[in-house]
Amino acid sequence: MLVLERRHRSIRAGAFVALLAAAILPHAVFAGPEEDRLDFVGYFQSRFPNVPFDEFANGIYAIDEDARTQWLEIEEFPPYEFAIERGEALWQTPFSNSSTYADCYDWPLGEIRAAYPKFDAARGEVVTLDLSINHCLVANGETPLAYNSSEMIDLTAYLAWVARGQKIDVRVPDDEPGSLAAYEEGKRFYYSKRGQLNLACADCHVTSVGMYVRADHLSASLGHPTHFPVYRSKLGRMISMHERFYGCVRDVRARPFDLQSLEYRNLEYFLAYMSNGLTINGPGARK
Amino acid sequence: MAPARASKFIITIAIVLLAAPGVAADINIRLAEAQGLLQQAADAGYEWLETAALLEQARAEMENGDLDNALALIEKAQFQAEAALIQAEREAEAWRSRVLQ
């Protein structure tokens, strides 16, 4: 036990040294979000020089021609259409106090999706679209939705649909110190190996991008946040981005975090920033 | 039963009865240690998928009286929790080397 207590102290000491180093080492070693994004985009563009930047919004279908052909046929009768219709009906249904979802947001309907994820200075944490919906419900005396509920997925599918064509434009404001910390936490999560398989998100979606995992190619992280929620054919239902995170963490045999946990919200914040400038094209259809 | 064999049987039963509480107490200590390590791994955000389930299975085996199997499960869980803590310690810095530049 003493050895492990020392180990635990060592972890804390490591984190302290990292923070100290971040404060004093040259900028190139601990780059800011925009430098990170340019390096991130540059990596994928060099790996796939024939894929235009905008195409990365199509996920795996940007780099896997056979899968793309199947996907384009699926898109002729999109399996997510019913979710959009249900989401629109939910959006338009007033709460018991006669307010509506629209009253909770400062943006026109088509711009709500693109406003998230954002760092909420008052709350001191990243707020995603899904979380904002539950904040809205609670503020109006309603019961919050489960994050994997059909209602939540339908609402986010509708908001993604009406936002199609908008660009991802996540900010990490200099005047909100907590935002950079949240971004860095998401970045750390993304590049950290975890679980019994000792794999980081980046091991599959950066280092091994385009390679086979069983019968499928691994997709690029650049563009992942544009198209959620998605209809997954293998599950026969829609899933959120956080449910996908949950599945990936479980697949590397680590204990997954809860949907909308701080860990996943920070991860979404980092990934969405990396995809800034790409076009929102959700909801999507995936295998 | 011959007197000599009867004596051996009684002595064996006595040893088992006297030893069992000690073994059970030892396993309880091992279980608590493994649970503590698992909690440290969870606090660090590095808990592995099946470690908690292994400890649950160990508890069930203890209730069924299969202490050997319970101990084997506890040792497996302890190994996983220690490995997860080593992973957490290493990744506190190692992740930086993977950031795209």
Image: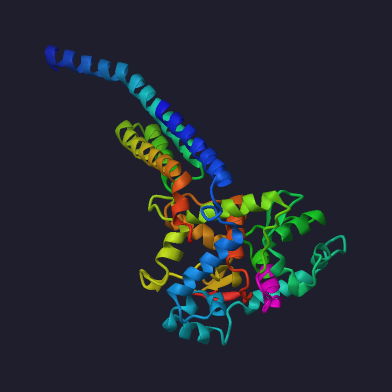
Which image quadrant is residue B70 in? top left
Disc tally is 0
Residue B70 horizontal side relative to residue B38, left or right: left
Residue A3 horizontal side relative to residue A168, left or right: left
Residue A244 lies, in percent from the top left, at 53, 63
Q: Image quadrant for the N terminus of chain B?
A: top left
Residue A46 lies, in percent from the top left, at 45, 73
Above or below for A42 versus A197: below
Above or below for B38 versus A147: above
Depth check, front residue: A287 or A160 = A160
Q: Is residue A6 magenta?
A: no
Residue at image position (56%, 75%) is: A57
Whether residue A1 appears in this view of the structure is no
Residue A247 lies, in percent from the top left, at 49, 60
Residue at image position (50%, 35%) is: A13
Depth check, front residue: A10 or A131 = A10
Residue A147 horizontal side relative to residue A188, left or right: right
The part of the chain drawn in magenta is: A155-168
Residue at image position (27%, 15%) is: B14
Above or below for B42 versus A193: above
Q: Is residue A159 magenta?
A: yes
Above or below for A264 versus B93: below
